[in-house]
Image (cartoon, grey):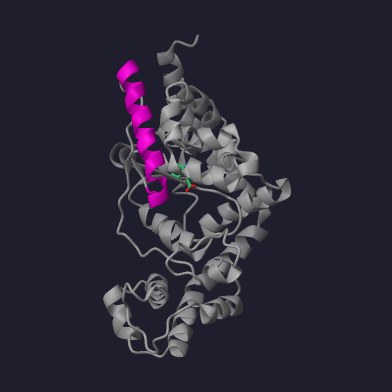
Amino acid sequence: MMKRVNTLSSEQTKEKKQTIFSGMQSTGVITIGNYFGALKNWVKLQDEYNCLFCVVDLHSITVKQEPAKLRQSSRDLLALYIAAGLDPEKNVMYYQSHVPQHAELSWILGCYTYMGELNRMTQFKEKSQKHVENINAGLFTYPILMAADILLYQTDLVPVGHDQKQHLELSRDIAERFNNIYGNVFTVPNPYIGKVGARIMSLQEPTKKMSKSDENVNAFISLLDEPNVVMNKIKRAVTDSETTAIYADDRPGVKNLMDIYSCATGETIEKTKEALEGKGYGDLKKIVGEALVAEMEPVQKRFFEIKQDKAYLDSIIKKNAETASYLANKTLRKVKKKIGFPE
Ligand code: TRP
């Protein structure tokens, strides 16, 4: 059994390496904002840390989902993890729904979380305003499940975006509360503060974050958009009434395009300015579009190869879920014992 635990193949590294956990929802498309903001950064963590990257499909059903679409997009997201460069032999990548310990710990932690705490969550307030017809209990208890995700694996560090900070803070509070009652059961997780990359903004309203749920498809670029679609969306991107490019906060459209270039090429902002400032908007968009396509094409190519190899993907899904389950059980057994459930 131990041999299967692929991230812990060497007992030595097990001692030294810290654990990182993160997850993404499998619904809809992955935008270049998700890619540059999360996925691509995860790739850099895989050698230094024990990483678990989860497709959080239990979280997805807090809003209505079509079964066939959910199944397909979950599979696609896992394939995208691999296509983006996450090595399934180095990281534990799996579906949350394949590891029932998440739901089990979530129930338990729910009994150590106060209604008042959940009531304060800004994401709940936002989402319940957005889905007034479906304000379900899962939407309310969503942060408890997220705490379970993190605490199950004795996670040290969690790379999360700004919108998830409050949830991570709550996970810490729950862990500390539990530890205060029962002794040191959970590692109290910290946010992973990486090199802060640019936030990719909407191409149509560049003061808003790029979002896959934007009604205007020209506002976002999916990681799987075809090259001509990418070029067209960039071409249509909102700029301003000036004529040549300058990187400045009060010119958010142009700044966003230059940030996209910087993310796609890996160049610093300084180098990006040198390359692009002074260009006319037609040229600017062409250069940015081409750089983006060059970054996306190999990922897309790998994605379609992986997707076609059903047996390969299935074997990875199975193996990684077993690893996750093994690790999760270690924590869950301890939790149950401490609480006083019969052995
Ligand atoms: N709630 C996160 C999001 O929507 C996804 C998520 C679920 C997550 N569980 C997690 C992120 C645990 C980090 C750690 O982005």
Q: Is residue 41 above or below residue 226?
A: above
Q: Position of residue 333 (x, y in %)?
A: 46, 20
Residue bounds of the magenta highlight: 159-182
Q: Residue at x 48, y 69 (%)?
A: 205
Q: Which image quadrant is residue 273 in?
A: bottom left
Front residue (pair 122, 234): 122
Q: Residue at x 50, y 46 (%)?
A: 126
Q: Is residue 281 visible?
A: yes
Q: Residue at x 39, y 58 (%)?
A: 41
- Main secondary-structure element of the magenta-colored stretch: helix
Total marks placed: 0
Instruction: Using residue 263 as the reference point, say whether residue 294 is left or right of it.
Output: right
Instruction: Using residue 206 as the reference point, say whether residue 62 is left or right of it.
Output: right
Front residue (pair 103, 42): 103
Front residue (pair 28, 333): 28
Q: Residue at x 30, y 51 (%)?
A: 193
Task: Indicate yes or no whether the magenta region holds residue 89.
Answer: no
